[in-house]
Image (cartoon, coloured by chain):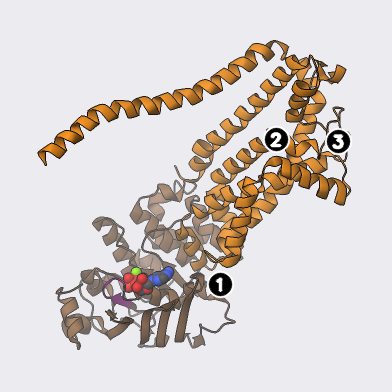
Chain colours: A brown, B orange
Amino acid sequence: MTQTLDRHSGCSPSIDAGTYTVGPLQSGPPCCVPEPLIRVTNLSVSYGDHPALKDVTLDIYKGCITALIGPSGCGKTSFLSALNRLTDMIPGCRVEGGIRIGGQDILAPRLDVSALRREVGMIFQKPNPFPLPIRRNIEMPLREHGMKKRADLDETLERVLTDVGLWAEVKDRLDKPALALSGGQQQRLCIARALALAPSVLLMDEPCSALDPIASGIVEDMIAQLRGRYTVVIVTHNLAQAKRIANYAAFFWLRERGGTLVEFGHCRQIFEAPAHDLTAAYVSGMRG
Amino acid sequence: MFEAGRFAMVRGRVLEPLMTLAVWGSALLVAGAFLWLVGDLLWHGAERLSWAFLSSSPLNAGRTGGIGPILVSTLLILGVAVAAAVPLGLATAVLLTEFLRPRSRFGRLVGLSLDVLAGVPSIVFGLFGNAFFSVFLGLGFSILSGGLTLACMVLPILIRTAEASLRAVPDDWRLGSAALGLSRTAALRHILLPAASSGLVAGLLLGVGRAMAETAALIFTSGYVDRMPSSLFDSGRALSVHIYDLSMNVAGGDGNAYASALVLIGLLILINGTALYLAEHWLNRRIIAP
Ligand SMILES: Nc1ncnc2c1ncn2[C@@H]1O[C@H](COP(=O)(O)OP(=O)(O)O)[C@@H](O)[C@H]1O
Ligand SMILES: [Mg+2]
């Protein structure tokens, strides 16, 4: 699998993603120069007059995995949804502040949201493959975005399914319904579906929390392999998982009026030398 | 504590069988009434039923002869009603579920009008259809007038069932397709409508069933003429109107009225059976199971 990803790797050749799958990571980005791809400034998200997230300023580094941790309700999902403008879908949801991805202001009202969402893929907590055959799950979005040639479609299908380690498992039943797959397979299919659109950023909202431990482990390893190729922002309640796969970690906490960012830093620093008492308490498992 | 427990036990011993009896009794009563009806129709009408009856023209004001032109008119009226009501109903349901905010003022207004319309007696639809389609639009007594009137009448059922089946589609798929940059149209076409299809079809068949059983809305719109219609602008007599006419206005028409009613009931059972079957088997299986 490592090799398949490397085949398409646009990242620095010094990185062997395979060595990062397990065990604590070295602090600091594993690849490239630490170059922020997403710059979030004073971001606030509110639903009606209920503030969900207040004043978050944070850089997300290119090619790295950034873990968002914190208790439920502190606005992690809202934060992710602002990054691909999925917040537009929620009536009454307001997003204020600045988000720039690759220098472009993605909160601009005239932005091509469809193009943004192709560039910034999203994986949900509950696997949500479409009620279509496995093949059509991947092909339908591709076709809608203008890929019409059979050969291109077939090539992409095989490539992304291989990337998520699903090809061997499903290549003989591509025309069977995706909903017949197991939970872990469904989630990997969803990741493959996002990868097929060639995004540069992947947002993952607790991608393993609906899965059994084994499936969760498989998906986690797979996410770790995405490092370098994609910029990954992952929400997780599994601190050990965050520790294993993330380069950076951001700790959110629920204050009286909505969630806030308490601390952001290298993953190792957040877990081993947190600067803030709340962070220290949370990562040592005393709260949350 | 002990007393209360004992009381509950006694109550259980008495109430439980009573409840069982009441529940089964009611179910048997309903089933019995239906069987009585069908049995009565079969008793009086079955012997007249034949291919010749289904295909030949009525004679002697319907006392003898068959119901060929009447079946054709019925199907044409239903066809017009479906062709007009389905696109309109689907579009309205899509507007209500996918484009308007939940509980928006306009959405609630539309919902309220639908609920009022659903409760309007069909004779009122008939009078409206006569005034609007026959007179105002100049369509006269015609299959077109009748079909369009029926379309107005079944629209509330159609929209409400379509709305319910679209709302039953999990939001996960809406978010999922939006997150892939798909347009709402694409999501509707590829995912939401197919996922809702069993409900949509069941609603459509319910609507068709209701339309087929309709008399009052058609008397003043598609009219009485029992000749074979040559176009949609001709008047045509629907099956239910035929039954009504035979049993109320034609002395000695009872035999054929029974036979026609048998045909109507048969068609209704067929339609409802199909709706049930589609809802339970085919459509869901195609989408969900391996
Ligand atoms: N669609 C919504 N409508 C209204 N309030 C919402 C919605 N989604 C989330 N919220 C509120 O925003 C706050 C943050 O939620 P969320 O971003 O889901 O947090 P997390 O993902 O960290 O659990 C919560 O108080 C939640 O009730
Ligand atoms: Mg969440």
Residue at which label 1 appears: A114
Distance between the Cα atoms at labels 2 and 3? 16 Å
Seen at 55% across and 45% down, the residue is B199
Q: Pointer 2 and pointer 1: residues touching (CB < 8 Å)?
A: no
Chain of the residue on which disc 1 is drawn: A
* Eye-nearest disc, 2 or 3: 2
Give residue A186's position: percent from left, percent from top: 39, 55
Disc 1 residue type (three-letter) = Ser
Q: Position of residue A142 (x, y in %)?
A: 55, 63
Q: Is residue A67 magenta?
A: yes
> On the picture, is B268 further left or further right than A55?
right
Label placed on residue B235: 3
Q: In the displayed structure, does residue A21 sit left or right of residue A283?
A: right
Magenta extent: A66-73
Query: Total label count?
Result: 3
Residue kind at label 3, given as amino acid type: Ser
Quick check: can you spot residue B186? no
